[in-house]
Amino acid sequence: MVLLRFAPSPTGALHLGGLRTALYNYLFARKLQGKWILRIEDTDAARTVPGAVDGIREALEWAGIDYDHGPGKDGPHRPYFQSERLDLYRSYADRLLESGHAYRCFCSADTLAATRERLARAGSNSTYDKACLNLTEEEVARRVRAGDKSTIRLNDRLLSSRPSPPDLIFGTLRDAHASLPTDPILLKSDLFPTYHLASVVDDHEMGITHVLRGEEWLPSLPLHLDLYACLKLRPPQFAHLPLLLNQDGSKMSKRKGDVQVIDFKRQGWESSALLNWLALAGWGVSHDSAHGPGSPLKHAPDSTTVMSLNEMVQKFDLSSVTHRRTILDPAKLAYLNQHHLMQRASTSTGLNTLAEQIQPAVKKAFPSSQYTTIPYIRDVITVIQGRMTKFTELPLLASFFFLEPNLSTDEAVAMRKSLPPDEYRITIEGLGSRLRSIDDAAWGTLDLTQLLHEENARVNLKQKTYMTILRHALTGVKSGPGVSDIMRVLGRERTIVRLGEAHSTR
């Protein structure tokens, strides 16, 4: 069975890059009827942020990508916090010591700093002089018994031969050993593992078949493959996801801009649209030489294809993820969000949940309004939805549904001045009279579009002038839903009252 893992560090809130990585793990696992694990890599206690794990879980839950095993969900691979697996890492470190693939280093931090400086001055690319590699077994044993602090380092002079499997996204990779530190530390002096040892051990012990992680781990891949070889373990298949970039081409940072998932939730974005946006960031090119590198795939979605999570699972193909870094375009998120909102509002259940979600913002914006019930907000959403990018915009876009229009604003005054007084009067009086002749029972089935067409023909005005007069009287603003839709939501009595108020305003 295919088994993947998403392994964030609890050093802060989940950001867009992390959510995209989690999403791709989810899509790949579900596509192949596999499972995925949430594993918390909390071995760096100094950088751990209280509450970060709960924040990560909350963000994943809001996004709707549920993991199969992990914190809060029992499973065969527990525990899911690396800080609870320390004995396991030490046992693997001992195996490396016994085979000669690792050794103890007793150098202090000051000694190591001085060594790095000396090597750099000498023009060496080495970061350590391997001083402790030559200690005798007796000397090492004596110092361990004496309680001297030590780290455990990989012996890069005694690496096992191994193949270099291609990355599932980047393909064949050049050897990057030269970029690695000399004899990397695997177990720190506090007996906590470094990421390198812990991730290799956990991926093996948990039976992970595929590792989908960020491009920033590519330089560490040779070290991880070396560890698999030294421990005589079979490595999983690796796929490194290219970085997401800001609009200016800079790397996204937790400290720069709104990149935290929770920010998007607070701002009113649809979780389905956010996933859609992230999924399509770099998805849709071929790695097959027959197509040419980076060429578009014939059946791949483009960067604005509106898809549900289930549709993403069905269409996802890891081989069509680009190896190039991708700029996230906020305009595409806005486009996708608008369409996800409309899809949500297209069903009775979706419309009702949307109205419930919007209601608190409406009540806060219009505390004195009596028109803030769920059924009424549903009606407003129905006529305003195509104009909303986010649901939080509804109070701003549709204030005239909840409050009487203010015809003394600069916009309303300018509209009135542009309309001939006589034409304004006969339009308002004519429609008001027509509506008063209609009883409430007939209002629900009345074709208001046809009624307005008839009234417009009767007063013989240009349609634009006629509709602008009514828009001014009913809303006091230049743009909005169709006039017949506005009347339908307002109802017969409120429409008549507004026409009368507008008629008396000069």
Image (tube, rainbow, N blue to C red):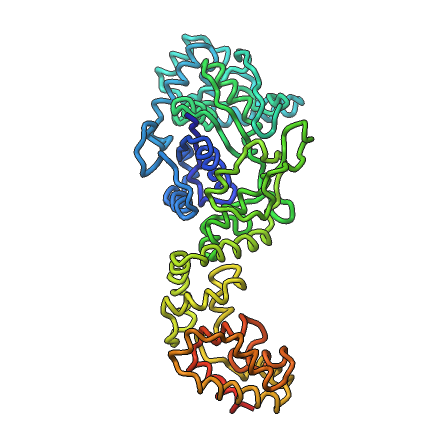
| Closer-to-camera residue (335/410) | 335
**Where residue 86 sits: x, y (%)?**
36, 26
Residue at point 40% right, 83% down? 439
**Where residue 67 sits: x, y (%)?**
39, 37
Where residue 468 sits, quadrant-wise, is bottom right
Give the quadrant of the N terminus.
Answer: top left
Residue 435 higher or lower than 2, as above or below: below
| Closer-to-camera residue (308/361) | 308
Give the quadrant of the C terminus.
Answer: bottom right
**Where residue 162 sits: x, y (%)?**
54, 14
Numbered label tally: 0
**Where residue 504 sits: x, y (%)?**
51, 91
Q: Is residue 11 left or right of residue 389?
A: left
Q: Is residue 242 left or right of residue 186?
A: right
Q: Is residue 188 visible?
A: no
Q: Residue furthest left?
A: 74
Where residue 124 sits, quadrant-wise, is top right
Q: Is residue 349 visible?
A: yes
| Closer-to-camera residue (262/445) | 445
Residue 180 higher or lower than 468, as above or below: above
| Closer-to-camera residue (120/202) | 202
Residue 57 higher or lower than 32, as above or below: below
Residue at point 49% right, 80% down? 405
Residue 476 higher or lower than 9, as above or below: below
